[in-house]
Amino acid sequence: MIVRRPIDDEVAPILALFEDEVRAGRMLPRTPESIRDSLDDWLVAEIDGQVVGCVSLVFFNPTLCEIRSLAVHPSFRGNGIAVELVRAAITMAYDRGSQRVLTLTRAPRVFEKVGFHRDFVANFPDKVWRDCTPCPFRMACDEIALIYDLMIPEHAEVLTPYREGVFCV
């Protein structure tokens, strides 16, 4: 498996990865334009030339970013792909100078395996004002906020250096 930055032609496969989750109301939709405009903030997992997973980063300020749009093709789930995508996203956040990585999720175990700790979304006003306030699910939100602190030395030490945009796993 290779984790790398996507190319423009992979926007449709990225959207297809979480299409069912969006339809079921478990993920917020993304437009092809929004993905294309932020392609440098996305990573994909590739196996035998097929995009089988994706994740993105959203930066709220110089010290805080969020992992979102984590998705793995159903046929490839349970193989550690999500964990590797999260690790790669954390490394990308670190290399860009972020100090903390936030996520809101219904699958906290994936993130806790990597070292995230539970928190409260109210502790991240930049996130609340930008994304939660207009969210159609805000009155019935069942996501768990987790945080990864890159300022903790042992957290930063376990990161794989981000080399030329490709992680081979």
Image (cartoon, rainbow, N blue to C red):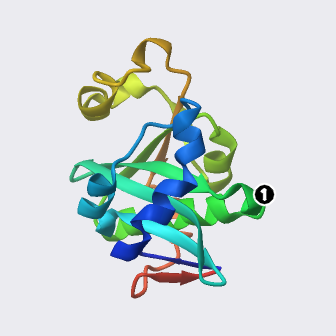
**Is residue 29 placed above or below 149 in the rendered structure?**
above
Quadrant for residue 80, please give it: bottom right
| The N terminus, quarter of image | bottom right
Q: Look at the image and tell me whether residue 156 can be seen.
A: no
Q: In the rendered image, which residue does mark 1 sit on?
A: 78
In the image shown, does 20 or 137 lie closer to the viewer?
20
Residue 168 % position (x, y): 59, 84
* Residue 136 appears in the picture as rendered: yes
Number of numbered markers = 1
Describe residue 104's horizontal placement relative to residue 151 as left or right: right
Question: Residue visible at 54% across and 29% down?
Answer: 25
Q: Give the x, y percent position of residue 85.
A: 56, 64
The residue lying toward the viewer, choosing from 82 and 17, is 17
Q: With respect to residue 143, does 98 lie above or below?
A: below
Instruction: Name the image quarter holding the C terminus.
Output: bottom right
Residue 117 lies left or right of residue 153; in this view the side is right
Q: Residue at x 64, y 60 (%)?
A: 83
Q: Residue at the spot x=54%, y=28% of the render?
A: 143
Q: Identify whether 67 is placed above or below 49.
A: above
The amino acid beneath tag 1 is: Gly
The residue depicted at 37 percent of the width and 62 percent of the height is 93
